[in-house]
Amino acid sequence: MGMSVTTSIATEADAERILKLQYLCYQSEAELYGDWAIEPLTQSLDSLSAELKDRHVLVARLGDEVVGSVRGWVDADGVGRIGRLCVHPRMQRHGLGTRLVRGMEQRLAEDERPVSGYRLFTGHRSLGNLRLYERLGYRRTDVEEVSTGLSFIAMEKSVPELAATA
């Protein structure tokens, strides 16, 4: 009998598991860009614990194991910000990233502040991420060159597009 993956709101008790998953998942990004000092690999447990209090954090679980996570918040301009999507490598390409992003969009839409749209970013070489976000209705809006080897691609989606991709 197999287990199904469930998604839920993360708790403080999930912090260490999320941090370990994040470290595992961002290894490939660090290798892709040749930068092992990226923030997801250097974030402290205290910093993540603070995010759990200040932001929306969803986790995907397979039994007791945290196999996916995503974070979000609504900024002062009413834009739902989505970040730090990570899915365990053995669980990728099964729709879990899609479930987590859509779950976060829904969670942000239920925030006490009205949401006018959603914004996220990914690295320019992260082709799988770009394909996923484009499939979910996000459009490239801006490129920010961080260094000679890294540019962030900003992607946005308006609120009406949420219903169209559900």
Image (cartoon, rainbow, N blue to C red):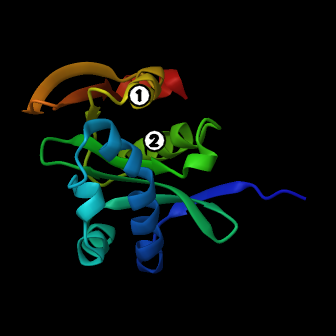
Q: Residue at x 70, y 67 (%)?
A: 63
Report helix, strand or loop for mark 2: helix
Q: Residue at x 46, y 61 (%)?
A: 21
Local packing at callout 2 (Cα closer than 10 Å; few below 14, some 14-19, many 20+) is many
The answer to whether 65 appears left or right of 29 in the picture is: right
Mark 1 vs 2: CB contact within 8 A: yes
Which image quadrant is residue 78 in?
top left
The answer to whether 108 appears left or right of 78 in the picture is: right
Task: Mark 1 or mark 2: name the one nearer the start of the chain.
Answer: 2
Image quadrant containing the C terminus: top right
Tell me, yes or no, if residue 107 can be seen here.
no
Residue 99 badge:
none
How far apart are labels 1 and 2 at the CA level?
9 Å
Q: Position of residue 39 (x, y in %)?
A: 22, 56
Q: Nearer the viewer, residue 29 or 75?
A: 29
Local packing at callout 1 (Cα closer than 10 Å; few below 14, some 14-19, many 20+) is many
Q: Is residue 18 above or below residue 115?
A: below
Q: Residue at x 41, y 78 (%)?
A: 12
What's the residue type where badge 1 is placed?
Tyr
Q: Position of residue 131 (x, y in %)?
A: 44, 22
The residue at which mark 2 appears reads as: 101
What's the residue type where badge 2 is placed?
Val
Q: Position of residue 8 (x, y in %)?
A: 55, 61
Q: Position of residue 158 (x, y in %)?
A: 31, 25
The residue at which mark 1 appears reads as: 133
Tell me, yes or no, if residue 112 can be seen here.
yes
Q: Nearer the viewer, residue 70 or 90?
A: 90
The answer to whether 142 appears left or right of 53 in the picture is: left
Q: Nearer the viewer, residue 94 or 90?
A: 90
